[in-house]
Image (cartoon, rainbow, N blue to C red):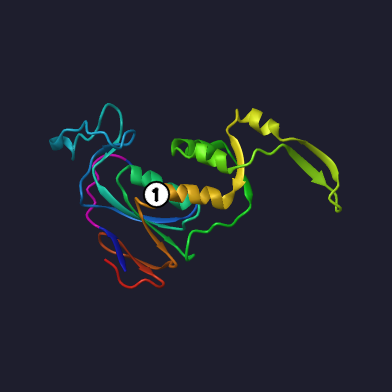
Amino acid sequence: MSDFSGNNTVRRGLFSDTFGPGHLTGTAINRPVCSSLHNPKSADFDQQDRDVNCQAGAVWCYSFFMKVLISGAGIAGPTLAYWLNQYGIEVTIVENAPRLRTGGYVIDFWGAGFEVADRMGLVPQLMEKGYLIREVRIVDERGRRVAGFPAEVFGRVTQGRYVSLPRGDLAAAIFRKVERKVEAIFGDSVAAIEPTSEGVRVGFERRGAQL
C-alpha cells in the first residue's frame, strides 16, 4: 500500500481531483509551500503571511503540499504529471505495460494539444519527428485515387501549428520531459484505493507494501 495522505493545510486557492481523461487521486498533506499559480517559482511571499494572506496581487496561491498518483503513462498522464510537477506537487505514475508503449497510428496534432506542447517546449522536437502531409486522398478498393485535396489547407487554417506524427513518438517526447522528475512504476496497476481520515492508501496488483 502507498500513502497519499496527510493533514490538509489549504488556506486559499483551488484544488480539483478531476483532470479530464485518465485516473487520478491525491490529497494535500502537511508540508507547507506557497506558490503563485502563474509563477510557481515566485518567492514574493512573506513567510508570516503564508497561511492567511498568501496572495500576490490578484493571483491565487496555495499553501499545501500534495502527493498525486496518476494511472496511465500514455499521453494525458505524463502531460498532467509535467504540469503538477511545475507547481511542486509530488507525482507517481503507474503503468500496466512493462515499458513505455511505442505503438499507435499516425495522428494529426493541432489545436489545444499543440498549444500545450508548445508551452512544454516540445514543438521543435515534434516537428522534427513528424510529417508534413502533401495530399489527402480517397482511393477505391484497388488503391486508385478517386478524390482528394491538398493538405496544405490544414497548415493555413492553423497558421503552421499542425503536424502529423506517430502517437508513440508524441507519448515518448512527453514522457522524457518528466521521467527524471517523477516516480514511474511500470508493469503494475492500481488494485485498491482505501480512504483514510487523512487521504487515501493505494494498493497495487504486483508491487509489495510501500509507505
Q: Give the answer, above or below, for where 18 lies relative to 115.
A: below
Q: Quadrant of the N terminus?
A: bottom left
Is residue 72 one of those drawn in magenta? no
Q: Position of residue 152 (x, y in %)?
A: 69, 32
Residue lying farthest to the front in this orientation:
128
Q: Note whether residue 52 is visible.
A: yes
**What residue do we see at 13% from left, 36% from top?**
48
Q: Give the answer, above or below, for where 83 lies relative to 60.
A: below
Q: Position of residue 135 (x, y in %)?
A: 74, 38
In depth, the one of 58 and 100 nearer the eye is: 100
Q: Position of residue 41 (x, y in %)?
A: 28, 36
What number of labels is visible? 1
Q: Which residues are magenta?
A: 6-13
**What residue do we see at 69% from left, 31% from top?**
153
Is residue 11 one of those drawn in magenta? yes
SS type, badge 1? helix
- Amino acid found under the numbered disc labelled 1: Val
In depth, the one of 105 and 192 nearer the eye is: 105
For disc 1, the marked residue is: 178
Q: Position of residue 27 (x, y in %)?
A: 30, 54
Q: Give the answer, above or below, for where 148 lies relative to 172.
A: above
Q: Quadrant of the C terminus?
A: bottom left
In depth, the one of 45 and 146 nearer the eye is: 146
Residue lying farthest to the left in this orientation:
48
User: Is 121 on the left or on the right of 43, as rendered?
Assistant: right
User: Is 149 on the left or on the right of 125, as rendered?
Assistant: right
Picture quadrant where residue 132 is located: top right
In depth, the one of 115 and 45 nearer the eye is: 115
